[in-house]
Amino acid sequence: MKKFVFLLFLLSCAAPQKDEEGMLAVNGTSLFYHAIGDGEPVFVIHGGPVLDQSYMIDHFKELAKHHRLIFFDQRACGRSAAEIDTSSMTIKNLVEDIEGLRQRLGLDKIHVLGHSWGGMLAAQYAIEYPLKVKSLVLCDAMPPSFRLWSEEETELAKRTTFYDSLLGEQIKAQEGFKNQEVSWVDSLMKVAFKTQFYDTTKLAGVFQNYIVVMPRF
């Protein structure tokens, strides 16, 4: 009997974690989170501001085979609580939201992966809570200072063509984009980040499998 109970205990420990989602009260607001996969926890921090996690999930399913990925919508974004004091929208609070979510989920050390705006938040979190960060991955992260960000924006503006601006507006006018369907959000991201490529001859290989909406003149 003891061996049987011990076997059941081992099986329960080895059982993979189920996908889950929900709302958690964190740092004076409520954040929507979505966890998938099984393994060491990885916080995936989306870009923005004002975007949400939806554009990232499909791209990280391979990583979820060996890691527990925790996506969440930043405060006042996506499915997180929209009613919020605008004065609370600070870098400090956004960083504290990450820490609060880690605590609410009962996690110790975490891997932190941030994209674009989320990369800047991820770096700030690692500075504030270095003992809680097992590894840090920055994907096309924003510059860490306003001066550097302004210089980057000025350079990128020089590379933006009239056609790309019109194409971006066409995508944002589509119902699919308004409903935040992943394929349409991806389409806008490809146009928006086109200027990030110094060598534009490499764009065809990156964009060939994506939806493109041709503007009407």
Image: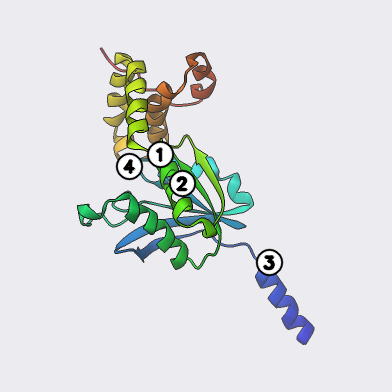
Cα separation between marks 2 and 1: 8 Å
Cα separation between marks 4 and 2: 16 Å
Q: Is residue 24 visible?
A: yes
- Closer to the chain start, of discs 4 and 1, is 4
Could you tell me which quadrant the C terminus lies in? top left
Residue 166 lies in quadrant: top left
Is label 3 or label 4 in front?
4
- Which residue is denoted by mark 3 in the rendering? 14
Residue closest to the far bottom: 1
Cα separation between marks 3 and 4: 38 Å
- Which residue is denoted by mark 4 in the rendering? 49
- Which residue is denoted by mark 2 in the rendering? 123
User: Do the numbered discs 2 and 1 sit on residues whose CB atoms are within 8 Å?
Assistant: yes
Q: Which mark is residue 69?
A: none
Residue 97 lies in quadrant: bottom left
Residue 104: where, in percent of width, then height?
44, 67
Dot 3 lies on which element?
Answer: helix
- Which residue is denoted by mark 1 in the rendering? 144
Residue 187: where, in percent of width, then height?
40, 29
Q: Amino acid at mark 1?
A: Pro
